[in-house]
Amino acid sequence: MKNILVAILGFLLIGAAALAQPANGVPTTPSPVTFVALKTVVVTPGKSTPVTFSFHIAPGYHVNSHQPSLPELIPTELHFSLPGSDIVIGRIRYAAGELRSFPFDPTQQLSVYSGDFMVKGLVVSPPSGTTGIYTVHGELRYQACDNNACYPPKKLPFTFNVRVGAHSRGTRRVRSKA
């Protein structure tokens, strides 16, 4: 009887562990970096609108800046998948990194982001842009580290909407170089 109870208990523990794991067997952990939701960006055809992409890094983590101190470090980068030729994202400007040293090498200062950081750019609609609402898919590529280790690079997908309309406030004309 005791052996049967031990066997049942063992099966229950194995079953509970299996339910706690995703189907592929790799445990999921929350991303140390999150995208701060963005309101719909409004742009008039033939004009541009500034946009700021904000990200939050969980306490205890940092990521390499866009221009890391050492060539072997992976830079933080934004990439976009645009919904056609009615929208362009340009003039991407990354925040400057903060120079910090860490316990694993106190003599080396690394250019990193921690806490909150922003990336700025322009959303442009060409003069022939069609009015409507478009969903832009973005991806932040980064490598997170803590004071003891760096983790494999990750990609953080995010989306935001752009409304191309006939009239919008706070925009300026796109100048062509002709």
Image (cartoon, rainbow, N blue to C red):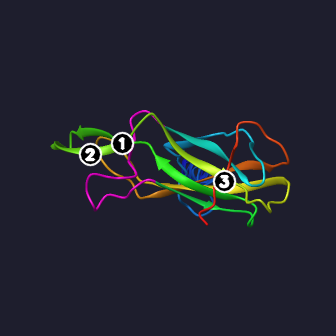
**Residue 117, label in figure:** none
Task: Say above or below: 125 vs 100.
Answer: below
> Does residue 1 appear anywhere in the picture?
no
Q: Nearer the viewer, residue 26 or 72?
A: 72
Magenta stretch bounds: 57-76
Q: Does the stretch in magenta take in 74?
A: yes
Relative placement, left or right, of 74 versus 100 is right
Identify the residue position indicated by label 2 in the image.
110
Distance in Å between CA atoms under marks 3 and 2: 37 Å
Tell me whether the residue at label 3 lies in contact with that at label 2, contact meaning CB atoms closer than 8 angstroms: no
Secondary structure type for disc 2: strand
Which amino acid is tagged 3?
Val
Which amino acid is tagged 1?
Gly
What's the magenta bit mostly, secondary-structure-wise? loop
**Residue 174, label in figure:** 3
Binning the other alpha carbons within 10 Å of mark 1 as few (below 14), some (14 to 19) or many (20 upward) gives: some
Which amino acid is tagged 2?
Leu
